[in-house]
Image (spheres, rainbow, N blue to C red):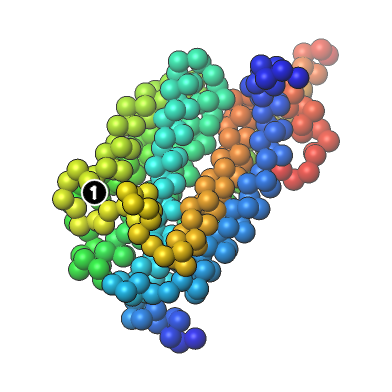
Amino acid sequence: MGTWTWFHKLSSPPHFYRIAGKMIPWFAIPAALLMAYGLYAGLVLAPADYQQGDAFRIIYVHAPAAWLSLMCYSVMAVAAAVGLVWRIKLAHALAAATAPIGASFAFLCLATGSIWGRPMWGTWWTWDARLTSQLILLFLYLGYMALRSAYDDLGKADRASAVLAVVGIVNVPIIHFSVTWWNSLHQGSTVLRKGGPAMPPSMLIPLIACFFGFTFLYAALACVRVRAEVLRRERNAHWLKDLTAPRLGAQ
Amino acid sequence: MNDFLAMGGYGAYVWTSYGLAAIVLVWNIRSALEAHRDARHRAERALSMAATDAATRSM
């Protein structure tokens, strides 16, 4: 089977629905293993930081949440752009499926950052570039979802919200570079920095496991949610009959 | 064990953060499964309604 045939088959809703379903355990199981190891090693095995003591352990949930909130937005914006330009319903479905996941991790990032900031900086919140741009990211997600729910017609919701998603992408590099461009209370990058990660392996390896674990979790969640979005868009399609009649499995 | 829970005096901050992370993870899993289940039920209902319509029309 040629690449094009494969791609064409994937883009048909019934195949996509089935393949997304089959992929779920392949993402969910590595996610569970990596997160279990990463969070356990971060809490128990990694040594306390010489400056921040045990408070630094918040990094194992805060940094992967921050990463996912940015990655989800990028996926959402690119999918929305593809949906707008080539009028591909599946791309809009992926964008819509990604938004609530990204929003939840943007919230987790802000909340854990605030909790970490209290003992380290002496304040829960400050209006500096990193914190403010991350808060805007959360509002972009919420705006995107509110805009979608304002339309009864899914096609209109897809197109209107896609424009917002695409425009909002400018915020993503602003968040990433905010600690370099402006004076910020927030520390610079720990892992992706010039001269290599500023952490010993005993701290770094659990963190990397968490990054991959959270990313696999996103993939598993996106598979489940995108299937729901496909069903919403294919409500009266005849292929659903084959799917619903024998009740193949719970998923 | 108490030392571990105390987290060098940062226990409240560390455990609240991990607690929130647990809530967000559980919410994500549950709401994704729920969204899929709802969409599936709606699709099934729409199909059975369409089938009834077709049956009535052919009578």
Q: Which quadrant holds the C terminus of chain A?
A: top right
Is the residue A128 above or below the residue A89 in the image?
below
Q: Position of residue A197 (x, y in %)?
A: 38, 56
Q: Which residue is mark 1?
A: A179
Which residue is farthest top?
B58
Residue A44, relative to residue A58: is it above or below?
below
Q: Position of residue A44 (x, y in %)?
A: 49, 74
Instruction: Decide if residue A155 is in sight here.
Output: yes
Residue sitting farthest toward the left? A183
Task: State the image coordinates of residue A19 (x, y, percent, origin top left).
Answer: 70, 33
- Which residue sits at x=68%, y=47%? A25
Measured as percent of width and height from the top left, residue A220 is found at: 60, 45
- Amino acid tagged 1: Val
Q: Is residue A186 above or below residue A92?
A: below
Label 1 crowding class (10 Å Cα cut-off): few <14, some 14-19, many 20+? some
Disc 1 chain ID: A
Callout 1: SS = helix
Q: Which residue occupies the extreme front position in the image? A: A195
Q: Is residue A212 left or right of residue A107?
A: right
Image-quadrant location for residue B38: top right
Q: Relative to residue A68, is residue A131 drawn left or right?
A: left
Residue at 39% from the left image edge and 42% from the top image edge: A70
| Residue occupying image coordinates x 50% and y 15% | A86
Instruction: Farthest residue to the bottom: give it.
Output: B2
